Structures are given as C-alpha cells and as structure tokens.
C-alpha cells in the first residue's frame, strides 16, 4: 500500500538486521531444544520486529506499565519468534533463549503470561487470542487509556469459529484501538486432502473480504517488507472511522531459509546440526 | 434454623450485582443474551454502563473477560451452567484458569430444574468440570441469602471462581447477612446417627430429609458444603467421626461432584460407609420440578431412603 509517513532508510536497515538476528536466535533456540516450530516463527518475525522495535509504545524495564501497547500472539505455537524479539528488545537476557521448552523455563512452548514478564496474554489453543484483545480494547476505552492492542493470528486459525465471534463483537463495540494482523503464509500443519497433497499451499476464500463483511477496515501488506509493515501498521492507527483494523500480511512460511520456505515439513521439526549450519550460512549472506 | 420463605436465588444474584457494582468500581457484567433469564437485567437496568452485551457467543465472552481482567476489571461472566464450562471449557482453561485471572463465572439454571427446558439446558456435570480445573474455586450456595453472601466473598478473593446458581425460588435455610467464608462447611443441624452432606439447593432437601428421619427416630447431622473447592476436609472428617456414616446429596451427577469429592477425602483420611444421592450417570429431560426430582432420585424421601440403607449396612 502507499505509505503516508516516510520511514527513515537507516532505521530500515537496522530493523532488517535485527530481524535477521532474530532469525538466528530462533534457529539457535530450536536447535538447542531439538523441538519447536520453525516455519511459522520465520514467517511472523518481521512483523514482530516492526511492532516491538518501531511501532508499539512500551518499556522493557516496566513490562506492567499500564499505558503500554498490548500484544497477543494468538498463534501461540510461534512463541520462539516472540521470545527472540523480546530478548533482543531487552525484556530478558538473550542467553535465556537456550532454555526454550526446557523444564522450569520461563520460555514455555506456548506463551505463559504467569511465567514471563512482557507477555500480555497466555495463548496456545488456536482461535482464542482475538477475544482477550477485544477485552483489552474495551478496557482501554473504559480506563481512558490511549494504548492500542495488536493481535497476531495465523491464517490457519481463522478456521476457528471463535475468531469470528470476536470479530463481530469488536465491530459492534467500534474498537478502533484494536488491530488484528493475519500472518497469511498459506501453510497450516497438515492441510486439507482436497487441496492436493499434504503440505501444499492452502488458499482460503477471501480473507480480506471476510473481515470487511464483519465491519472491519482491511489493509494488506507484504509481511516481509519492513517498510510496508511499518507504513501499513502506522496507517492502521489513523482514520479508523471507529472500526477495528485487520491487516492481511502476505508472508512465506520459513522465510529467510531457502530450504524451509513453503515446505510444511518445517512447521515443527527438530533441527539437526547440518541443516542448522546451512540455515545460518544463508542468513549470514553466504550463498547456499 | 427453620426453613424461611421461598426466595429467588437468581433475583438475589441480580440484586447483589447491583450492590457490588456500587461498591466495586471495577466490576463489570458480561451477558450472553440471557439477561432476562439469569437476571443480570437487574444490573443492566440499574447500571447500564457496567453491563456488556456479548451476544450469543460464549467462547468469545470468556476471552473478553480475560482481557478485561488483565486491566484490573472484575468481570462476571453470566450464562447458563450448561453452557459455561462445557461450551467455554477450553477458553476457561487457557485464558482464565491457567493464567489465574480474576474472572467470576456465574452458571445460572444449574441442575435439573431449568424451567422444563430439557437435557440440553440442564447441567449435571458442571461441578465435576470446574472442580478438575487447577486454580478454580467452586461455590454452590443453598439459597438466595447465601448467593448474596457468597458473591461478596467472591469479590474479596482474587482468582477465577465458578458460582453455581439455580433458577426457581427455594426456602431459605441460611441466615441473611452471614459473612461467607470460602472453603468452609456449615453445620445446619446437629445429629448423631448419620451425617447428611449437601451442596447447593440440595442442602434444603437434606434438611427436609433430616426432619423426616427425626420422625423415624433417627438423628441426622446436616453439613452444608457451599464450597466444593477448596473442600472443607476437616469438617467432612469431623462429621464422619461423629456419626460413622455419610450420605451426600447434590442436584448433579454422583460422578465427579460433591459425592466424589467427599468420598475422596474420606477414603484418604477416614474410610467411612457412604451413600451418594444424585443423578446416576444419566442426563435429564423436560418435566415439572417435582416430577424431575422424583424420577431422578433427588427428593428428601430419596435421601431418607439412602440414610436408612446406610444405617442398615453400618449396624448390620
């Protein structure tokens, strides 16, 4: 989409570099844990970096600051992407990423708000994240607080009916302070038989049209273009006409590691030494 | 105490919400398009700004409540007991119980007496469901007075709580204005031969059973457990020691509810002969209240029969 507000070029370079470093951290943590998701975290990480480093009002030293913007990772299985970004942003030491998925770790397989400061909601059961976002947006208005609530959903979880219950109520309450971002990478874990073989791209009928039909304003963006992400999400906070905003982020599952891109087998998979090294070489800019 | 006049627990629920809203500025009520049944319409009329209509979408309603709770609001989610806990169970598990958020869940029309609506709207498994959830407190008041008292106590305790409510007016058996202690059992009648342990409105029927037993020369002790979780284990063990035989009574399945909970405590701490009065692994149906209680074995006479059977077993 056309951007109204200019984005500083040097800042874009920094943010892309941060996203690249987060990808390394994601791969490292999943390699250490020998468990966890990869495809989804790599498709979502650019959006997360843009939110946490450029868009959201927050203070890592005060994770409970009442006026902070809220973020809910509805696709909770991509927790490692959020953890990598939170660690980079200073919420906790980067070394702690090595405890991902381990016993007694604050970095649970799915985000646990009781374990780790900086998580605004516990998630993991798909389709649930937007509803607490509606509650936060209603609550912000009641409290007279200006913060915004961002919810990142997977495109697969749009199959859950609760998403549309929440979408209906959000529009009814005219929650202009609520932004839903759909990570539209076209690849669920196993897919539908009639989509061909398991793991083929699964197009969903008119994602943008469905949000619009529920009364949301809908924007679309390239979910891997730092410039587009920032311009679009910033725009989502303006001229809302009392509507919540849905942003369809066109993404690639496994983005950034060529042999993982659009390959559903990397949805969740232990990362062996050989593939880990190959992935790091790619991220370092060395030709595969 | 002698049973008092018939009072409506659901009206008490609605009126107490009004009083609570005036005392607690952060209280909000979420309705799933049932306000005229659950009587949250009383709150709506008095304080429309505290009432959030969520439509016929219970799963979202629980999630919205969780989001509000993170901002310090105290949301009361109101629906039928048959829906809360079954339809919303995953939402309650993931965004209320696991994060231990301060959400109050009010299940109206519990048990069988739901205005002849039949099994889809009856709730015979809600105690079992909520009792199994970590962090969850479970309360089933006996009458309108206790509904009011329990709700004030719920506001003073942080954390997720399920309140089991009933539809139709019932005799009051607890004093109005008593300070309700969550987790405490209350002895409503002293006796020595057999202990009747009740919860919810079934405690009223246990008291009627005790009066019938007295006419037959049997001295029944009546313990009311309005809190199913945490359970007053000491009170349960005490009445078992006092009488040597325990009958539980609940308008709920005997699987997983009060009877199961009492049996677990006694099996571990003081094995005691027991009988459980409740639904015996069946769903209900439409019908008049008296017919339903008779057919599904919940009347005072059924409790009397269970007590006499138990005494026969104990005394040989």
Image: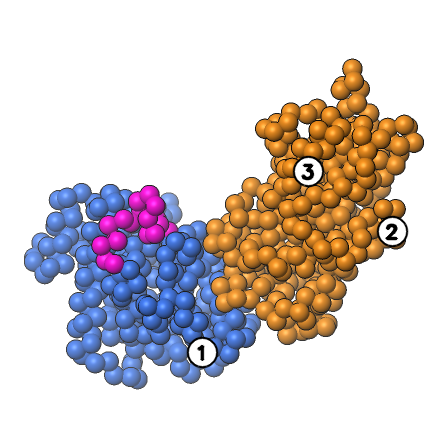
Chain colours: A blue, B orange
Q: Position of residue B69 (x, y in %)?
A: 52, 63
In the image, is residue A145 part of the stretch drawn in magenta? no
Can residue B306 be seen from the camera position used here?
A: yes
Q: Position of residue B248 (x, y in %)?
A: 72, 34
Q: Which segment is the magenta one? A: A93-110
Chain ID of residue with mark 3: B
Instruction: Identify the residue position indicated by label 3 in the image.
Output: B235
Secondary structure at numbered mark 3: helix
Can residue B298 be seen from the camera position used here?
A: no
Instruction: Identify the residue position indicated by label 1 in the image.
Output: A146
Report how far apart the C-alphas of labels 3 and 2 lie in the structure.
25 Å
Q: Give the position of the N terminus of chain A as an image quadrant.
A: bottom left
Q: Main secondary structure of the magenta part?
A: loop
In the figure, is residue A161 to the left or right of B292? Answer: left
Chain ID of residue with mark 1: A
Q: Nearer the viewer, mark 1 or mark 3?
A: 3
Determine whether B87 is above or below A88 in the image.
above
Q: Toward the viewer: A76 or B144?
A: B144
Q: Nearer the viewer, mark 1 or mark 2?
A: 2
In the image, is residue A100 part of the stretch drawn in magenta? yes
Which residue: 25% across, 45% down? A33
Q: Toward the viewer: B97 or A20?
A: B97
Instruction: Identify the residue position indicated by label 2 in the image.
Output: B4
In the figure, is residue B224 to the left or right of A180? Answer: right
Report how far apart the C-alphas of labels 1 and 3 lie in the structure.
51 Å
Q: Toward the viewer: B211 or A235?
A: B211
Q: Position of residue B34 (x, y in %)?
A: 69, 60
Report how far apart the C-alphas of labels 1 and 2 lie in the structure.
52 Å
């Amino acid at each position: 989409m056309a951007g109204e507000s200019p984005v500083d070029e040097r800042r874009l370079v920094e943010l892309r570099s941060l996203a690249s470093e987060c990808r390394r951290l994601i791969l490292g943590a999943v390699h250490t844990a020998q468990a966890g998701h990869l495809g989804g975290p790599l498709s979502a990480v650019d959006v997360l970096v843009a939110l946490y480093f450029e868009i959201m009002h927050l203070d890592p030293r005060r994770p409970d600051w009442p006026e902070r913007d809220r973020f809910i990772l509805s696709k909770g299985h991509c927790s490692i992407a959020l953890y990598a970004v939170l660690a980079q942003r200073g919420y906790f030491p980067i070394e702690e990423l090595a405890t991902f998925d381990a016993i007694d770790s604050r970095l649970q397989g799915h985000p646990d708000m009781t374990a780790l400061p900086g998580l605004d909601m516990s998630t993991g059961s798909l389709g649930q994240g937007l509803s607490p976002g509606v509650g936060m947006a209603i609550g912000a208005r009641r409290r007279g607080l200006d913060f915004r609530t961002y919810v990142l959903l997977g495109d697969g979880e749009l199959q859950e009916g609760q998403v549309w219950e929440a979408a209906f109520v959000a529009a009814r309450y005219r929650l202009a302070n609520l932004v839903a971002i759909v990570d539209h990478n076209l690849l669920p874990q196993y897919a539908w038989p009639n989509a061909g073989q398991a793991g083929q791209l699964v197009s969903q009928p008119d994602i943008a049209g469905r949000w619009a039909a529920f009364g949301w304003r809908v924007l679309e963006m390239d979910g891997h273009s730092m410039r587009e992400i920032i311009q679009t999400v910033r725009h989502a906070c303006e001229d809302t006409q009392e509507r919540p905003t849905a942003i369809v982020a066109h993404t690639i599952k496994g983005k950034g590691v060529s042999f993982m891109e659009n390959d559903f087998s990397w949805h969740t998979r232990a990362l062996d030494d050989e593939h880990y090294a190959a992935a790091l070489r790619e991220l370092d800019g060395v030709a595969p | 105490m002698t049973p008092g006049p018939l009072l409506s627990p659901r009206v008490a629920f609605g009126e107490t919400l009004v009083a609570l809203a005036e005392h607690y500025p952060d209280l909000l009520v979420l309705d799933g398009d049932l306000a005229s049944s659950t009587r949250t319409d009383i709150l709506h009329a008095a304080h429309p700004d505290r009432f959030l209509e969520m439509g016929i979408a219970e799963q979202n309603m629980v999630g919205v409540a969780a989001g509000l709770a993170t901002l310090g609001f105290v949301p009361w989610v109101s629906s039928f007991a048959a829906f809360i806990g079954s339809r919303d169970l995953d939402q309650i598990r993931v965004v209320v119980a696991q994060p231990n958020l301060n959400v109050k869940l009010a299940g109206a029309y519990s048990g069988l007496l739901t205005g002849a609506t039949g099994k889809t709207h009856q709730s015979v498994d809600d105690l079992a469901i909520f009792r199994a959830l970590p962090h969850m407190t479970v309360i089933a008041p006996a009458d309108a007075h206790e509904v009011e008292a329990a709700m004030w106590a719920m506001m003073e305790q942080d954390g997720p709580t399920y309140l089991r409510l009933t539809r139709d007016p019932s005799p009051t058996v607890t004093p109005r204005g008593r300070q309700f202690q969550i987790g405490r059992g209350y002895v409503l009648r002293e006796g020595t031969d057999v202990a009747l342990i009740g919860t919810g409105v079934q405690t009223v029927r246990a008291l009627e059973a005790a009066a019938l037993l007295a006419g037959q020369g049997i001295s029944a002790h009546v313990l009311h457990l309005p809190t199913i979780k945490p359970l007053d284990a000491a009170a349960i063990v005490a009445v078992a020691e006092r009488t040597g035989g325990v009958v539980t009574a609940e308008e709920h399945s005997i699987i997983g509810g009060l009877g199961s909970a009492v049996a677990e405590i006694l099996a571990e701490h003081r094995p005691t002969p027991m009988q459980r009065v409740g639904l015996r692994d069946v769903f209900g149906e439409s019908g008049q209240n008296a017919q339903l209680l008779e057919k599904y074995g919940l009347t005072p006479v059924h409790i009397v029969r269970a007590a006499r059977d138990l005494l026969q077993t104990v005394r040989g």
